[in-house]
Amino acid sequence: MRIVIIGQKWLAEQLLQQCLNDGHDVVAVFAPSPNDRLFQAACEHRVSAFDLLPPAEMMPESDVILAAHAHVFISQAHRETAKLGAIGYHPSLLPRHRGRDAVRWVVHMGEKITGGTLYQMDDGADTGAILLQDWCHIRPDDTAQTLWQRELAPLGLRLFQQYLRDWQSIQPKAQDETLATFEPAFTLKKLSG
């Protein structure tokens, strides 16, 4: 499969490695900076790497765009450059805990179970149809960082791998809006004046 990866940090870097190991053709990656792990790993593997999303008409042709720890809006025009659109990973059991700080909020709220969701990206914030989900326990002593590293990041990699293997048989399921929650930024930056 021809893949574009948009993301950053460990998760996106590991997704790139996993895709290459599984024999996929990663045609390009987009990371926020040339100093990012994804950008550097792409260069090491001779995969085209960019630090900005180009206009949609300049996107490379692909079968799918994978968004791993991507904190950028992927427009409809960009999503339409890939035959299967854009698939994102969110570290919660959508439609619960939409938003950037989902992991911090589940720990802060004292929840006992969380999980991860692979979903079809749309114009909303974590609102697209669910493709795959899996869950995990939250330990009493977990922090957002320990939960992410031990459970949620590896879970995301497994879901991406399952999607790339089984995409033809996966049936998208609309999110139940009556169960949806959106969590704001966990900490607000003080205004400077």
Image (tube, grey):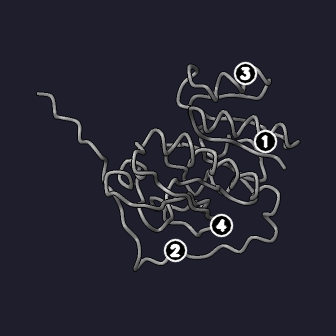
Residue at the image point whose x is 26% and y is 42% from the top = 187
**Type of residue at label 1?**
Cys
Q: Which residue has dot 2 on it?
A: 175
Identify the mark nearer the N-term, 3 or 4: 3
Q: Which residue has dot 3 on it?
A: 43
Q: Which residue has dot 4 on it?
A: 131
Depth check, mark 3 against mark 4: the one in front is: 4
Q: Is there a contact, CB below 8 Å, between mark 4 and mark 2?
A: no
Tell me, for residue 110, which label it has, or none.
none
Question: Which element carries disc 1, helix, strand or loop?
Answer: helix
Q: CA distance from mark 3 to mark 4?
A: 30 Å
Q: Residue 36, position in %: x, y?
A: 57, 25
**Type of residue at label 4?**
Leu
**Type of residue at label 3?**
Cys
Identify the mark nearer the N-term, 2 or 3: 3
Q: Is there a contact, CB below 8 Å, between mark 1 and mark 4?
A: no
Identify the mark nearer the N-term, 4 or 2: 4
Depth check, front residue: 115 or 150? 150
The C terminus, quarter of image:
top left
Q: Which residue has dot 1 on it?
A: 19
Question: Which element carries disc 2, helix, strand or loop?
Answer: loop
Q: CA distance from mark 2 to mark 1?
A: 27 Å
Identify the mark nearer the N-term, 2 or 1: 1
Q: Is residue 42 left or right of residue 118?
A: right
Image height check: is 191 above or below 181? above
Question: Which element carries disc 4, helix, strand or loop?
Answer: strand
Q: CA distance from mark 4 to mark 2?
A: 10 Å
